Amino acid sequence: MVERSDRIAIMNKQDAAKKVFLRSFGCQMNARDSEVVKGLVLAEGYGLTDDPAAADIVLFNTCSVRQHAEDRVWSAIGNIAKMGVKRGTAPKYRGKAAPAPKKIIGVIGCMAQNYKEGIFKKAPAVDIVCGPSEIDNIALYLDEVIRSKKNVLAVSEKKRKEDVYHTGFYEAKDHAYVVISEGCDNYCTYCVVPYVRGRLRHRAASEIIKETEHAVRAGIVNITLLGQNVNAYKCQVSSIKCQVDFQDLLKKVSQVKGLKSLSFLTSHPKDTTNELFEVMRDTPVIKKCLHMPVQSGSDKMLKAMNRGYTVKKYHQLVDQYRGLVYNGQLSTDVIVGFPGETEEDFGATKKLLKSVCFDSAYIFKYSPRLNTEAALLADDVPKEVKERRHAELLGLQKEISRKKVSSCKCQVSGEKDEI
């Protein structure tokens, strides 16, 4: 393994000019991780390009939440593997154009953690497999592949180095994602996140505020706090022997001078409290938008999914939210076709959508995920039934959304698996 102190000696001028193309799949957390990677490689002398054909290095920041997202990655790897590096006018060799040099291909993120060395077996063109907890060393791994021409496998569940969040690189000029926690402890039976992003780990509140302040000073005055489960946030402040929870964090971040708007993703119903709604109500800078995934309107399905709440409890939260946050927008996630879902269960979900009247919703067809508890269950809802239920809910939610008058930008209806 090449140490950081040796990098400059290893990288010559040609290496320093190498161009990186990064394609991101999945959620907002992946979008922020992709910004982190871009900031890190720029700091080490690499360049960025929006043209994969012109790139020396192609990185795929991957998602394992659904089969469809993974299938797209495998296809994209195959397409890139057929490409060489485009260098303008190709040099001649014995009267013929010399073959373009091979691109370095890296799979980073959730698929890397989930499949590990299996990626090299399925896609031999891949050079780097780097899990979410190892992206803070991505420039090191690129250097090593360039130097040794050997594959690099880097997967772990360690906490990232804090400085990865302070490169100052953001894609948008007026909005930034700020990660407040990594990983998840919920272990919903369908969800791969705890297995690919590890156990829940919180960033220090002081570092979150510091990152927000830097973004605002750079003119980025709209901030979204990110976590797999933001309202589970807790951070011990040893100097004053107290604990900062999510509501405390919202209050602290909202006081950053120059901040214009503050939002957050994603809230888990089992950790959502009246206090959160009061903070949203009483803090003008916080957007009145709440994304609170319900997943199903059937208590039987919620129990099978290990969600930790009932339909009655979810309705109570909705009533409290709308009673406290004037004109608050509400969006959700729904899964159809989970193992054992009957027409009665599906009907209960339709009933919930009609009664709650979400402003918008993500609606997904269940697909088994490697390593999850639900993967051990029979995937017994036929594909055509999943597709019918999916189409029904999309149509229902589209009609509900059409009738709603939205005053802020929340999640939009339908499927989305690329940021």
Image: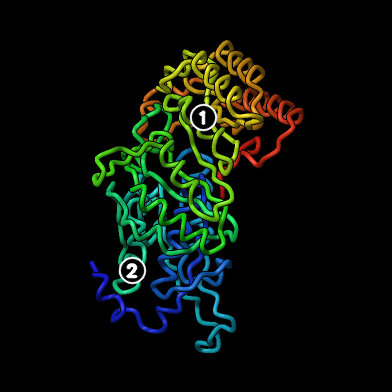
Dot 2 alpha-carbon crowd within 10 angstroms: few under 14, some 14 to 19, many 20 or more: some
Residue 325 or residue 365, whichever sits in front? 325
Circle 2: element type: helix
Q: Residue at x 54, y 23 (%)?
A: 337
For label 2, the residue is 145
Percent of width and height locating residue 124: 39, 58
Q: Quadrant of the N terminus?
A: bottom left
- Indicate the quadrant where residue 57 lies: bottom left
Residue 178 or residue 189, whichever sits in front? 178
Percent of width and height locating residue 381: 53, 21
Q: Residue at x 58, y 59 (%)?
A: 172
Q: Residue at x 51, y 70 (%)?
A: 48
Q: Is residue 153 left or right of residue 331?
A: left
Q: Is residue 281 left or right of residue 45?
A: right
Q: Is residue 90 above or below residue 416?
A: below
Q: Is residue 32 above or below residue 321?
A: below
Disc 2 to disc 1, C-alpha distance: 52 Å
Residue type pointed to by label 2: Val
For label 1, the residue is 278
Can residue 74 be seen in this snapshot? no
Dot 1 alpha-carbon crowd within 10 angstroms: few under 14, some 14 to 19, many 20 or more: some
